[in-house]
Amino acid sequence: MHRTYSMRNNRAPTAQQMATPPPPPSSTKTGRFFGKGSLAHTFRRTTAGSFGPDLARKLAQLVKMEKNVMRSIELVSRERREVAKQLSLWGEECDDDVSDITDKLGVLVYEIGELEDQFIDRYDQYRVTMKSVRNIEASVQPSRDRKQKITDQIAQLKYKDPNSPKVVVLEQELVRAEAESLVAEAQLSNITREKLKAAFAYQFDALREHSEKLAMIANYGLSLLDLVDDQAVTPGETRPAYDGYEASKQIIIDCENALANWTFENAAVKPSLSIRQGQREGGFELEDEPLRGEGMEDWGEQDKIGEPAEATTSEVPAEEKGPAPVMAA
């Protein structure tokens, strides 16, 4: 059988991996104490929001839910690679064209599983970054609790003994606690914004790379299918001999080269926004320039955005326009 090429053997680092080294393996791939099933997912999600400081519970639950997502993707990745092997085994006993194409399709499907496994490692960077915000929230909770405790003590003492000398001492402690709390809250506010942007930058970069590479594989897979002769034959008729071995192999090679050379700089999908950042920091405002769309049918291809189209009629001198109409009272 013509099984001479595989994308899985002795693969060199891709251009994107050389530009930005891949992250370490995901922490969700090891240390599985509660197993892999849905029961473990439910247990992690429910317990995460039941323990720990109140301030950090919601984010702690989010982090655990993201771990469930990653382990689900890991399961899909593993099963997809098994499907790719089974597809190749099934096609081995079929006709020559089906045997060759199913083997090459198995290579592509296996590569999808590999990409999903790499996606998990990059996605884990997002989860770990959000986890650091959870840790900061947990560290801020004691300062809030201390300030609230002192406030309650002052209120209780003023109710029982307004002239107690302990009130002055507690108020001084409250001032120090509020100062510490202000510092902690400011740090939390700054770090939350910084980590939020970094975390979702990791996630969206991983999604961009994963999605564009999947689209590449899908297009090359469609090219493989074009090599299959699906013309119906009558009983007793012999189907023409298959001669697409070199073509199918070249499609796999081209796919590997395309995946290896992909970088963010040559990404095919670019955002097209109808808003732009305004002068004020962190704000957005509508585009000042008109955009092509409804009501802009008269614009030619040579017209540029922001420049008015040339008038289609000549200017009429003011003296030839006649007197202005008189408005009725």
Image (cartoon, rainbow, N blue to C red):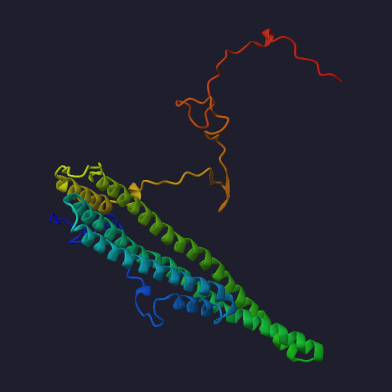
Residue closest to the eye, 254 or 322: 254
Outermost residue toward the front in this view: 235
- Across and down, in percent, residue 190 comes to 53, 66
The quadrant in which the N terminus is found is: bottom left
Outermost residue toward the right in this view: 329
Outermost residue toward the top in this view: 320
Residue closest to the eye, 313 or 35: 35
In percent of the image, x 79 and y 87: which residue is there?
Answer: 158
Does 286 sit left or right of 252 as displayed?
Answer: right
In percent of the image, x 55 and y 35: which residue is there?
Answer: 289
Does 41 sit left or right of 94 as displayed?
Answer: right
Residue closest to the eye, 220 or 256: 220
Does 47 sit left or right of 170 as displayed?
Answer: left
Name the image quarter holding residue 106. bottom left
In percent of the image, x 33 and y 65: which residue is there?
Answer: 77
- Across and down, in percent, residue 100 comes to 19, 53
Residue 161 in sight:
no
Q: Is residue 202 above or below residue 246?
A: below
In percent of the image, x 39 and y 54: which residue is there?
Answer: 208
- Across and down, in percent, residue 185 comes to 59, 72
Residue 249 in sight:
yes
Name the image quarter holding residue 205. bottom left
The quadrant in which the C terminus is found is: top right
Residue closest to the eye, 177 or 306: 306
- Across and down, in percent, residue 136 comes to 51, 74
Q: Is residue 285 above or below residue 4?
A: above
